[in-house]
Image: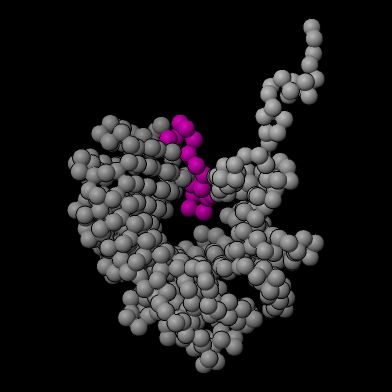
Amino acid sequence: MTTMSNDAAATKAGPNFMIYGPQKLPVEIQDIIVDFLSSNRPALQALTLTNRHFRSLAQPKCLSKITLKINTNLLKSVPDPISPRSFLDLLDTSPHIASYVRSISIIQPPCELPRPTLAARATETKVIEEIMSRTHNIRDLCFPVSSYRDGALGFLPLWSTLEEGLRTLIAKFYQKKSTYPRTVDLRAFSYVPEQVLSSFRDIRNLHIAPLDIPTQAAVGTASQGNEAQPDTLNVLNTLELCFYEDWNSWEPTLQFLRSPTSNFDLTRLGTLITSMFLTSAQLESILLLCSENLRHLVLQTGPNINSLMFYNGGQEDRSYHMPPPDLANLKRLESLTIHGQLINLTHFRGRYTTPLPWIANLLASLTKSPAFSDTFRSLHLELDLICIRSGGFGSLNWQELVDTLCDNFHKSQMRNISFKFWHAIGTDSEETALAHWQVEKINNDQLKHLQSVTGIVSIR
């Protein structure tokens, strides 16, 4: 048996074999490969290790969005965070990567951890200032919530309690004019002063908790009566109203955003993400402004949206009936995503709660909209099953929701109806994805009928 050397095999394979390699691929194909992997950070990092050529292509994508954390405890909800000090050290050893950074997200300590001392926060702020002075191409400086608990239960730190240097840093950064549309993410802080937000320029995506309107809070040197005023309106493409307290907290903020004197234009809003604590009337007041252009709507719903209960020391304080918002005026909606909770509270309050009838009524109003028969394509339901044992999965009642979709499917252009479930045994338990056998159990006769009529249902 004869063997052939690698060179001989390559020669026999043809002249193109020897010269074929990643650098010989058309530039367009190389860009497609890198862009395809850009949303998968581990895969993108692996690509940088293949060879020098692909490293030069993938490294700018890897480092375009940086996540930093203020404290040393790893946060499970944020992938691969590093401290500002560590990243500054990296810039010292590899200064060329500073030009790759476009967005920096800074994660504050979770509410359950002790907050850093004032001196430690001042030191961290100086490090962040140094990082920003070196990353000249940065467009966005974001402060997302560190966990669902921080946002949902109102444990966000007040803007007025932040280190003064950090407040000034944020204000000055967004008061500068930019040639690129920018994202403001201040979900980690509650009650940012309205005059601070009004001074921001060239904003396209806005993610906020309730604002302070009117305000007595200071924002370092930016609040001494010299706020820069934007030359034009901030025409928003995305608006997210983060979880926080009850609907009363949101009313002044919504009045500010809807006001003709506001420097934020909602009429061309493409994506709206709402808090579960908005009332239907508050949500409709926003939808009225953007009904011509809204394409993606994400709704957060509570466990029993039909009869919201407020508890004080474990006792019922007040309740009221809240019908779903009217979606009949939406002209161009393409997708609706609903995050809800199905909670069995019988073990300590003697009742079972579900938003399913509310969702069915919401969809009924959507079927009357011009968008439903023209542009609407996708419905996504992401539901948390809390304190519901696996044995009860099959008994969940989907009938109203299924009837609404089946009766109106023939006049729609829908291509996807997806259900995604998360399961937690207790109210404080960590949520996990359902196992295959649990998915089979929850897929009862009602959901199977929906699949048989539409053929576009996925459950996981």
> Which quadrant does the C terminus fall into?
top left
> Which quadrant does the N terminus fall into?
top right
120 relative position to 389: left or right? right
253 relative position to 427: left or right? left
Residue 132 appearing in the image: yes
Q: Residue 340, percent across and down?
A: 38, 52
Is 437 magenta? The answer is: yes
Q: Residue 272, percent across and down?
A: 38, 62
Residue at image coords 51%, 87%: 227
**Quarter assignment of residue 419:** top left
Residue at the far bottom in the pictured view: 225
Residue at image coords 62%, 67%: 137
Numbered range of the magenta stretch: 424-439
Residue at image coords 61%, 78%: 169
Is 82 magenta? The answer is: no
Residue nearer the viewer, 92 or 242: 92
146 relative position to 347: left or right? right
Q: Is residue 70 above or below residue 260?
A: above
Residue at the far front in the pictured view: 15
Q: Residue 263, percent across and down?
A: 40, 79
- Colour mapping: one colour
Q: How many marks?
A: 0
Residue nearer the viewer, 423 or 401: 401
Residue 361 appearing in the image: no
Q: Residue 146, percent across and down?
A: 57, 62
Q: Is residue 129 above or below residue 440?
A: below
Residue nearer the viewer, 207 or 56: 56
Residue at image coords 27%, 63%: 292
